[in-house]
Amino acid sequence: MAEPARASRDRQDLASAAHVDDDVPLMRRLRDGDDTALSELHDRHVRAVYLLARSKVDSASDAEEVTQDAFLLLWRKCRRIDLTGTSCLPWLLTTANYLALNVQRASRRLTQRVTTALSADDLTSPREVDAEAARNMELEQVGRIVAALPQIDQDVFRLCVIEGLSYKQAAYQLRTSHSAVRNRLSRVRGALRKQIDQ
């Protein structure tokens, strides 16, 4: 009986979250560099964002990470966000939904990789072990190169290469154009090839 009661309470919390104060002054302060505005927005909307995230992902820790990332993106993109109405909650919920979908995709891919690895023959030749070690070293090098890129290029690489999103999907998440994503990813790949070949 506790679960239906909790689910009902969660739905009420989400519904009541629509009746929040005006976020416009807080967003204005956030754009002016006032970090206390982010804390106030967080306190105001964190429960609704967490509840949405928790309804989409398998674990509480994943929901907490999605929630944290949604507020981090609000802080990073505050100058480019146009509120619909006076609340930033719709933007936060939309962002959390996309982040949660990314977590779900990553979890499914990891499960598939683990299943494939467990079903593979455990007896590997020394040549296969050497090849795997070389691949791991190359992946570490790629990780270091990507980490040194501007944040937008890191985001494009993560969304398109690691998470497998299309240019259009990545462009929507990054609030940019399809061609900008394609051009950035092309430059990132060129930089990777150049540095790996050195």
Image: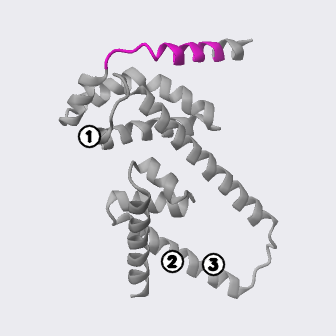
Q: Residue, x 70% and y 54% (percent of image)?
A: 111
Q: SS at mark 2?
A: helix
Q: Nearer the viewer, mark 1 or mark 3?
A: 1
Q: Residues within 10 Å of mark 1 (few under 14, many from 20)?
A: few
Q: Are marks 1 and 2 in contact (CB under 8 Å)?
A: no
Disc 2 target residue: 138
Q: Residue, x 82% and y 73% (percent of image)?
A: 121
Quadrant containing the C terminus is bottom left
Which is more N-terminal, label 2 or label 1? 1
Residue 129 drawn at (x, y percent): 67, 81
Mark 3 to mark 2 CA distance (whole Å): 10 Å
In the image: residue 153, left or right of residue 11: left
Q: Amino acid at mark 1?
A: Arg
Q: Are marks 3 and 2 in contact (CB under 8 Å)?
A: no
Q: Nearer the viewer, mark 1 or mark 2?
A: 1
Q: Amino acid at mark 3?
A: Glu
Q: Amino acid at mark 2?
A: Glu
Which is more N-terminal, label 2 or label 3? 3
Q: Residue, x 38% and y 66% (percent of image)?
A: 184
Mark 1 to mark 3 CA distance (whole Å): 44 Å
Q: Which residues are magenta?
A: 7-22
Residue 146 versus residue 43 in the image, above or below: below
Disc 1 target residue: 79
Check residue 17 for magenta coloring.
yes
Q: SS at mark 3?
A: helix
The image quadrant of residue 165 is bottom right
Disc 3 target residue: 132
Q: Residues within 10 Å of mark 2 (few under 14, many from 20)?
A: few
Quadrant containing the N terminus is top right
Check residue 91 for magenta coloring.
no
